[in-house]
Amino acid sequence: MTGGRHSLYLDFYPPIPHPSTGKLTRREFLKLYTFDKPKTELDKQHNKETRTLAENIKAKRQLAIQSSNYGFLSTEKKKANFIDYFSDLANKRNGTNYDNWNSALNYLKDFDGQFDLAQAEAVADLINADSEA
């Protein structure tokens, strides 16, 4: 990076799905920068605090990755609105497939406008329990 600074990023191996796009990625740029050759005490303190912040972000990402590997939902996903999630999925469809998804979305909206993922899991568990009985 120019100006005697380095950009900090996380490097994942193997690649992980990007949270927004779902495409596999190896890097997450943190938009944090450190001085290559800190000249003042303030520059040194900046580097130390920036590295600490980067380590905290790294630990948070590591926990998120490990929890998803073992089937746990992150707190962000638990608080997510199911209708918004389903709508995003429906908008990625084409042709008659889009019509089917959009129809299902309308039924969900009619059923309950605020349906989070935790509620969806509870409903799925009830359906599975009824089908096993």
Image: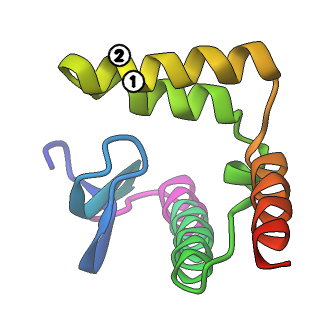
Disc on res. 100 = 1
- The residue where tag 2 is placed is 99
Crowding near pointer 2: few (<14 within 10 Å), some, many (20+)?
some
Assess whether mark 2 and mark 1 are in contact (beta carbons under 8 angstroms): yes
- The residue located at (70%, 40%) in the rendering is 80
Residue 113 visible to an observer of this rendering: no
Looking at the picture, which amino acid does disc 1 mark?
Asn
Q: Is residue 78 left or right of residue 5?
A: right
Quadrant housing the C terminus: bottom right
Closer to the camera in the image, 53 or 73: 73
Q: Quadrant of residue 113?
A: top right
The region drawn magenta spans: 36-49
- The image shows a total of numbered marks equal to 2
Apparent side of residue 84 relative to residue 97 in the rendered image (left or right) = right
Find residue 100 and report its horizontal and vertical position in percent. Answer: 39, 24
Q: Quadrant of residue 39?
A: bottom left
Q: Is residue 63 above or below residue 48?
A: below
Q: CA distance from mark 1 to mark 2?
A: 4 Å
93 lies left or right of 79: left
Magenta stretch: includes residue 37: yes
Residue at image x 41%, y 33%? 89
Question: What's the residue at 43%, 50% (across, down)?
Answer: 19
Q: Secondary structure at mark 2?
A: helix
Residue pictured at 76% horizontal, 69% vertical: 131
What x and y, as percent, mark residue 2? 13, 44
Identify residue type, mark 2: Asp
Left or right of residue 29, residue 42 in this image = right
The chief SS type of the magenta part is helix
